[in-house]
């Protein structure tokens, strides 16, 4: 997963062009709509990617029932 390492210097809470590019890269890597917006699907993917061991994950069913 791409991104910046956690450090005290990375505490800026401004959603600037650099962060938009990081979100777009994450979306691209996770086959999401690439729009640079951390919407619901992106947040779910982030939560899953950053989850703790043993934590439940939201996943798409392999064979959804129609």
Image (cartoon, rainbow, N blue to C red):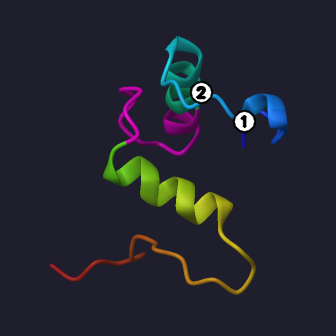
For the residues labelled 1 and 2, the Cα–Cα distance comes to 7 Å
Mark 2 neighbour class, 10 Å CA radius: few under 14, some 14 to 19, many 20 or more: some
- Tell me which residue sits at (81%, 28%) in the image: 9
Residue 47: horizontal and vertical position, in percent? Answer: 55, 62
Which corner quadrant of the image does residue 34 belong to?
top left
Residue 64 within the segment the image draws in magenta = no
**Along the line of sight, the residue nearer the viewer: 62 or 21:** 21
Residues tagged 1 and 2 counted as in contact (Cβ below 8 A): yes
Q: Left or right: 48 with respect to 6?
A: left
- Tell me which residue sits at (46%, 72%) in the image: 59
Q: Which residues are magenta?
A: 26-38
Residue 62 vertical placement versus 20 (above, below):
below
Residue 61: horizontal and vertical position, in percent? Answer: 39, 77
Q: Split into 4 quadrants, where in the image is the N terminus?
A: top right
Residue 48 vertical placement versus 2 (above, below):
below
**Majority secondary structure of magenta residues:** loop
Which corner quadrant of the image does residue 29 belong to?
top right
Residue 59 vertical placement versus 56 (above, below):
above
- Tell me which residue sits at (63%, 83%) in the image: 55
Say if residue 3 shows up in the picture: no
Q: Which mark is residue 22?
A: 2
**Along the line of sight, the residue nearer the viewer: 4 or 63:** 4
Q: Secondary structure at mark 2?
A: helix
Identify residue for label 1: 2
- Number of numbered discs: 2
Q: Split into 4 quadrants, where in the image is the C terminus?
A: bottom left
Mark 1 neighbour class, 10 Å CA radius: few under 14, some 14 to 19, many 20 or more: few
Residue 20: horizontal and vertical position, in percent? Answer: 49, 22
């Amino acid at each position: 997963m791409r991104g910046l390492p956690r450090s005290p210097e990375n505490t800026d809470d401004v959603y600037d062009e650099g962060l938009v590019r990081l979100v777009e890269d994450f979306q691209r890597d996770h086959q999401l709509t690439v729009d640079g917006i951390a919407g619901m699907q992106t947040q779910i993917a982030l939560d899953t990617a950053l989850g703790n061991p043993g934590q439940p994950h939201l996943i798409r069913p392999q064979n959804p029932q129609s």
